[in-house]
Image: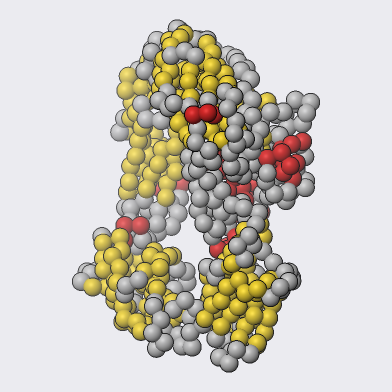
Amino acid sequence: TSVGPSGTPCSPFNLGCGWDRDGSYADWYAGHELGHSLGRAHATASAALCGNSASDNSYPYPNGHIGPNDGSMEGFDVGDPTFGIARRVYPGTTWNDVMSYCNNQWISDYTYTGMYNFLSSATAAGTNAVQAVHAGDAYIALFGTIYTDDAVGTFDVVGLWDSAGPYAAPAGGPFRMVFLDGGGSELAGYDFDGEATDTDPTNLAYEVVVPFPAGTQQIRMVRTGDGAVLATHTLSANPPTIGNVALVGATEPVSGTVTLTWQAEDADGDALMYDVFYTDDNGASYTAYALALGEPTVQLDTTQMAGSSQARFRVIANDGTRTAEAESATFTMASKPPSVFILTPEDGVEVRYGTQVNLLAEVEDLQGDVPDGSMTWFVNGAPTGINGPSYTAYLLPVGTNEVSLRATNVNGQTTSRGVTVIVNDEVGYPGPLLAVGPDQLHWQLPAGATATEQATLDISNIGTGNLSWTAAEDVDWLSLDATAGTTPGALTVTVDPAQAPADTPLSTVITISGDNGQTLQLPVSLLVGVSPVWAVEEAPPVETQEVFLPLVVR
């Protein structure tokens, strides 16, 4: 799981935190958070310049750039004309790695290779590498956050487990978990430390999984330097009880939306929360379908539950520390047909006669894998004799063609999905295509700044023919030196910090429209005063480079 970055509170399990405080550019940092989940740390080389923590000393390029200073490494964006995204080359000396906090983010070969190797290792290890944990009383698992500036901590997750699972014992640190009995006497204590989060280096996410001292009724989180108590958690004496898990009014095989109910009590009077799981393999594995419910009933949509004659629901009741579980009787869940997705080409693609068309599909089935032999390609309703998820169509006839894939699962259920391919017998040209670079602007200015700042946008036609454009904005603190022009052209953007309230992130978009019907929106942000964790480096303009590919005309 990757969390953030639009102000999401620090999550348990140290999975990441939100740190884009104005919430306007969350999409910029989705790759950053995924990078953490794929084993990537912050580039130490960019720490001093951009404010990220220094946690990857092996990053090879200076200042967090995606290449060395000699310019021998560049980033390449293949673009997507469907969404108006142009092909671009990103200079390695001015664009920065996604695992930094700098502006102008792209991915370096170092980070790409690291993510690839992580995924390859995880695939090779397989599911046997996962250490499962279950409810018990041998270990207690504590997850949360310490806010060192405020001298407070949180217990986000408290659970009793049968084993420590993948978690090692804490290796010491400036904080201590103290376990107390009902009389306030210490039963055990464990020193630990936290790890700085992306939200703020003073926020420390912690994971403490240790043997559970029998008789514990309270846990205190203490700062060992001065004995300050950062947080306390009281444990209930008795676990809850739960039973009578049943489907109400459902007929077999079960399908559609169903109601699941159960009965639960807690001898200590604690409020209970419930998690609902589903198994289609007689209890060998379970999938979560509803979490943190406050009432002993839930409506469940079964359309995404695998069909099975050995299906059950499990409900786990939680009083904040202790748990109890119960299951429904075994029932039959209706089987579901497979799902077919045509990945390429897009529907309605136009090609010239004689061009081979490469089709790629993905087939998913809740009951299991669909073998290649159960996938068949059709052209205009006639079987091609080609099986599997890919197919290359040669010499499609001129006109509109329907190319489809039919998949059949183990229960004989069938789904077909297709795309339209239009074949022309004339040479076609792409026509005008609007491109603007850079594709975003950001200014961070010191408190009290009044001098205007400027940046230049390059507006170009990366297609054929002629292209005119118009530009518009609608905020007081931003202005444009032109509202219309032709390509190639330039547009000067000016921001006036005197029109911006202090310590308040501002954001807007510049709308640039071409007379070809294409519209691009370029995000612009301005901050005067308080410094978030964003980089302060001015975003350099994208160097425009044209890539020429051969055109073969038969």
- Residue 9 coordinates in the image, percent (x, y): 52, 56
Instruction: Please report the residue visible at 42 percent of the width from the left and 50 percent of the height from the top.
Output: 364
Name which quarter of the figure residue 336 lies in: bottom left
Q: Nearer the viewer, residue 509 or 451?
A: 451
Residue 163 in view, yes or no: no
Return the residue nearer the eye: 24 or 130: 24
Residue at left 50%, top 53%?
8
> Which residue appears at 35% of the width and 71% of the height?
294
Q: What colouring style does the render use?
A: secondary structure
Q: Quadrant of residue 67?
A: top right
The residue lying at 36 percent from left, 69 percent from top is 293
Residue 99 in the image: above or below residue 163: above
- Up the image or down, 468 lies above or below 422; here it is above
Q: Is residue 250 above or below residue 531?
A: below
333 sits to left or right of 343: left
Instruction: Name, please, the residue furthest toward the bottom.
Output: 183
Q: Residue 77 at what x, y percent from top left?
A: 58, 28
Q: Nearer the viewer, residue 545 or 501?
A: 501
Q: Give coordinates of residue 328: x percent, y percent.
A: 34, 77
Q: Is residue 527 at all visible to an observer of this figure?
A: yes
Query: Residue 452: horizontal and vertical position, in percent?
Result: 57, 23
For this view, does 149 lie left or right of residue 491? right
Instruction: Say how many tags the image has.
Output: 0
- Please say if 42 is above or below 189: above
Query: In the shown orientation, is residue 546 left or right of residue 262?
Result: right
Q: Nearer the viewer, residue 385 or 298?
A: 298
